[in-house]
Amino acid sequence: MDWVTQVTERLRATGGRMTAQRRLILETLAQCTDHPTAEEIYQRARQRAPDLNLSTVYRTLRWLEELGVVGSQRFEGERPQDRFDPAISANPDHHHFRCRLCNAIIEFPAPLLDLLKRDFIAQYGGTIESASLTFYGLCQSCLQKVEAYGPLSFNPDAILNHPR
Amino acid sequence: MDWVTQVTERLRATGGRMTAQRRLILETLAQCTDHPTAEEIYQRARQRAPDLNLSTVYRTLRWLEELGVVGSQRFEGERPQDRFDPAISANPDHHHFRCRLCNAIIEFPAPLLDLLKRDFIAQYGGTIESASLTFYGLCQSCLQKVEAYGPLSFNPDAILNHPR
DNA sequence: GGCTTTATTGCAAATGATTTGCATTAAGGA
DNA sequence: TCCTTAATGCAAATCATTTGCAATAAAGCC
Ligand SMILES: [Mn+2]
Ligand SMILES: [Mn+2]
Ligand SMILES: [Zn+2]
Ligand SMILES: [Zn+2]
């Protein structure tokens, strides 16, 4: 059974209805290998159904978030917008590295994080229910470019993506 | 030399001017033991100078952020607003635990994070310039209350703080 | 298939934290 | 004290996200 069908069942189980819009958004999410914003998901989905509405995209994403099917988070150094993470359902315990230059996001597991959690609990008590870890830096290929050509004075991608 | 004076010197070094408003905001920050929002800093500072403007608070905070004197970050589960961190200048490498019930924030060091960074670099290459780690859960006292009285059905503080 | 209920949509307007333009004020060096 | 220009106050703009509401359409039932 594929991902869209699985989500559909969870949806029905809570009294929800499967609509063309939701199916489209789910299929769009299923094809993502990145961490798109609501607007990006909207644009991709709209190619198949031009009268889809951005509000519907937001409502669907928030509802998927409640179900634990997608994650959402913000990254530093870009304008304050949520990025959504369909990979969270298949791989709940991954974390993120974000390249300051090319904006690539690398997902990685962090089993050693349990050590840090234990350390914290040992010292301060309480319980940890979730953890968010993000690394910022230069990815391998950007690092090589910087080493080869010297530091760039600005980031063309950042300007393209964050016009303000 | 105290913190305010130190910051003043850095400020002057970059061609900036020390104003009454900036001094007030700096002194307000110096007294913080928490992670206030811009609005909270504004309210605290305004008690001493009622005609202070919120824009000035924002501009001063952003400028301090550039200088590396304060940090800013957002926490999950509250409305999307920046919280500012004066402790970052004295203690650059601390991370945060946030209690889901009482909203308390505990700062903690995480020397073991270096292991995780090394792991990542060994696997994916590149460099890590900064890392953000946040734990979410129940603090010691909230955990005890929950264990003693059973789980709360809602969080009064959350309602007070996030009226939407 | 039709009928009914009500969850969901599209649209436009609202929200709210943060930023910005601009005229006015005031640091701080000469 | 005067001059330059950085900084302020104020109001308006931004912009991602949410929300109210009338219209639409799932899906359960006959
Ligand atoms: Mn991810
Ligand atoms: Mn802190
Ligand atoms: Zn890169
Ligand atoms: Zn607590």
Image (spheres, coloured by chain):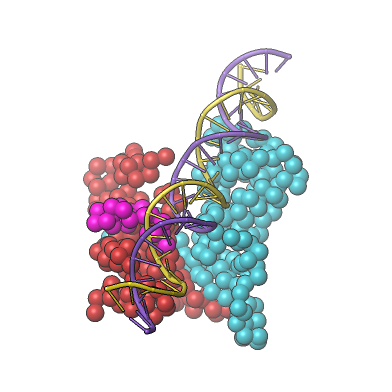
Chain colours: A red, B cyan, C yellow, D purple
Report the span colored magenta.
Answer: A39-59
Q: Residue at x 42, y 39 (%)?
A: A164
Above or below B13: residue B84: below
Magenta run includes residue B5: no
Res. C29 image quadrant: top right
Tell whether B117 sits left or right of B88: left
Residue B32 vs residue B117, the one in the foreground: B32
Residue B3 seen in render: yes
Q: Main secondary structure of the magenta part?
A: helix
Q: Residue at x 34, y 45 (%)?
A: A161
Res. A111 image quadrant: bottom left
- Residue A139, image x and y in percent? 29, 55
Q: Residue at x 52, y 71 (%)?
A: B136
Res. A10 image quadrant: bottom left
Count of numbered badges drawn on the protein: 0
Residue D28 vs residue A22, the one in the foreground: D28
- Residue A28, image x and y in percent? 27, 62
- Residue farthest toward the right in the current orientation of the protein: B48
The quarter of the image holding the N terminus of chain A is bottom left
Residue B114 seen in render: no
Residue A101 vs residue A152, the one in the foreground: A101
Q: Residue at x 23, y 45 (%)?
A: A148
- Residue A64, image x and y in percent? 39, 69
Magenta run includes residue A47: yes
